[in-house]
Image: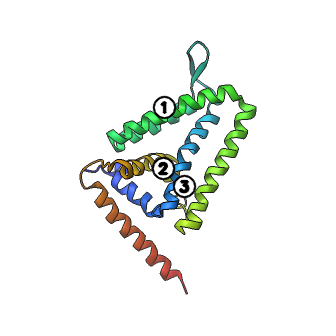
Amino acid sequence: MGKCGLFDLEKHFAFYGAYHSNPINILIHTVFVWPIFFTALLILYFTPSLFQFSLFGNNLILLLNVGFLLTVIYSLFYVCLDVKAGSLAAILCFICWVASSFLAARLGFSLAWKVVLVAQLICWTGQFIGHGVFEKRAPALLDNLSQAFLMAPFFVLLEALQTLCSYEPYPGFHARVEARIEAEINEWKDKKQKLLP
C-alpha cells in the first residue's frame, strides 16, 4: 500500500497527473524533464567541492559538491517513494551526475554555462508550450514548486514505466491514481467554470 505524507506516491502522482493528462504535453515532458536535471548538474559541477576523485586516470574527475549532494537527495527521495522504480531513477540520477561531470570538465565554465542556458530555455519553453497549447492548464509549478523541481523526473520515469511495461508500485495503484486524477481535473474545471462571468 501507499505511504503517508511526503512519501505518499499516490497523492503526488495524482497531483502531477492532473496537470499532465494531454498526450502531447506528456510527450513534451518526457523529452524535456530529464535534460533539465542533467544540465542543472552540469552547471553545478562548478560549485566548490569538499572532495574530488579521479576515474580512468584523470579522464573523469568527480567532485563531491552541490551537484553530488543534489544527486544523493533526489536518489534517496525516489527510492523512498518506490523501491523498484526509485532505484532505477536513482541509477539514472547518478548516470546524469557522472556524464554531466565529464561534459562539464571538457567544456569548461565559459562554454558550459552557455550550453546550460540554451538547454534550459529550450526545455522550459517546450514545457510551457505543452501546458499552454495542449494541456490548456498552467504548469504544476505555480501550485507546487517541489513538483517542478524535485518530483518531475521521477514522475516522468514512472509514467514511462506504466505506459511501456504496465508497471505499478503496488496492485491497484494505477486505478486509484486515475480516479484521483479524474476527481482533481473535475474540481479544477468546476472552479474554472465558477470564475467565468
Question: Can residue 145 be seen from the camera position used here?
Answer: no
Q: Tell me if residue 147 comes above or below residue 39 in the rendering.
A: below
Give the residue at x 62% y 30%: 45
Q: Which of marks 3 and 1 is in front?
A: 3
- Single out the residue that lies furthest toward the front: 164
Q: Earlier in the sequence, mark 2 or mark 1?
A: 1
Tag 3 residue: 28
Secondary element at tag 2: helix
| Three-letter residue code for mark 1 | Phe
Q: How far apart are marks 2 and 1 (CA)?
A: 16 Å
Q: Tell me if residue 101 comes above or below residue 124 in the rendering.
A: above
Q: Distance between the residues labelled 3 and 1?
A: 23 Å
- Single out the residue that lies furthest toward the right: 110
Question: Can residue 99 be seen from the camera position used here?
Answer: yes
- Single out the residue that lies furthest toward the top: 57
Secondary element at tag 1: helix
Tag 2 residue: 152
Give the residue at x 48% y 50%: 152
| Three-letter residue code for mark 2 | Ala
**Side of 53 where 92 appears, left or right:** left
Tag 1 residue: 94
